Amino acid sequence: MPRILLTYPADERPVRYGAALEDLRGLGEVVLNPHARTMTGAEIAAAASGCVAIVADRNTPFGADTIARLADCTALVRAAMDVRNIDIPAASAAGILVTRAGPGFREAVVELLLGQMVDLARGLSDGVIAYRAGRVPERRPGVQLAGRTASILGYGNLGRRMAEVLGFLGMRVLVHDPHVDAIAPPARAVGRAEALAEGDFVICLALHSAETDQSMNRDAFRRMKRSAFFLNPSRGRVVDEAALAEALRDGTIAGAALDVGSDPDDVPPVALGRLANVVAAPHIGGMVPEALASQARDTVEQVADILAGRMPRFALNPESARRLTGRPRTP
């Protein structure tokens, strides 16, 4: 019977992997992380002995040293789209396939973004805070979403869906993504400068890379309207957080909504979240049962393919997966 290692810490496993564990057990013997913490490299190597596949959580590091110890592993399967914890070049050099789950979080993140947009536009959190303190809040005019401009930076799975939803709500939708040629109506492709200058809501959905690292900086915020709101559900390191704090404090922009930050656990920093014109959430965009279950199911399907010798969906380095395909390494 094939062996499969599931690395989620014991306390996180019921929430983040849930019922998919029984489906995974239907494919082979599942080895579990017995600790309420991430495993060390030595612990991973010991637990992975004889395991064909490893289903990895986001916090367990698979650096080059750990990967070098995975003598029996054919594939590393991430139960999400974020694969920052896996050294893909090292895995490729070892002939190990790396896969990730699909965008099962998309609808959940869109819903969170809509809620944050409405909160920024209508000051709902301010009202809630006042009422809970025993005061009737001041009634102030808000901002209607319909008729306003939403600028989306990044046109991947989430950006495309967000554009559809905001267009349906009657917003003018601008998209900037230098890596995408075709932008579907109702959105319109624009340059970065126009996206920043025209957006009443600037939504950062860009992947983090060397190109985008801290690309939302002081200059970017100064190009935005003083009445504009900035939203970031993508990656904290896309934003210069000191520049964002400055822009929020001095009125360069009107407010921000965050679900991510540069903290290792991806949560927004308290220094930003405590500002009166910020709506912050602790990286909960995909934290709903439907999204978590979708991504966990993806890993079960991928492990089934791997055990059958098939290349799974969402494979990231199929050309290097020699342990799965049996191809010799090219000199």
Image (tube, rainbow, N blue to C red):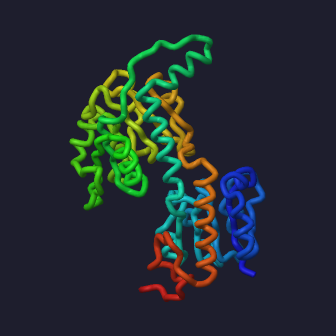
Q: Residue at x 44, y 47 (%)?
A: 234
Q: Is residue 49 left or right of residue 265?
A: right
Decide: is 163 above or below 246.
Answer: below
Decide: is 188 above or below 201.
Answer: below
Q: Is residue 275 left or right of residue 167?
A: right
Decide: is 245 above or below 213.
Answer: above
How far across and how far down the image is residue 163, in percent?
Answer: 36, 49
User: Would residue 148 be seen by someone viewing this image from the given angle?
Assistant: yes
Q: Nearer the viewer, residue 165 or 106?
A: 165
Q: Residue at x 50, y 25 (%)?
A: 124
Residue ranking furthest to the right: 34
How far across and how far down the image is residue 328, in percent?
Answer: 49, 88
Q: What is the count of numbered marks? A: 0
The quadrant of the rendering that contains the C terminus is bottom left
How far across and how far down the image is residue 227, in percent?
Answer: 31, 26
How far across and how far down the image is residue 91, in percent?
Answer: 52, 71
Q: Residue at x 27, y 33 (%)?
A: 224
Q: Nearer the viewer, residue 113 or 10?
A: 113
User: Would residue 208 be seen by someone viewing this image from the given angle?
Assistant: no
Decide: is 223 above or below 47.
Answer: above
Q: Is residue 331 left or right of residue 17?
A: left
Q: Nearer the viewer, residue 241 or 22?
A: 22
Q: Is residue 323 left or right of residue 169?
A: right
The quadrant of the rendering that contains the N terminus is bottom right
Q: Quadrant of residue 220?
A: top left
Q: Residue at x 29, y 49 (%)?
A: 175
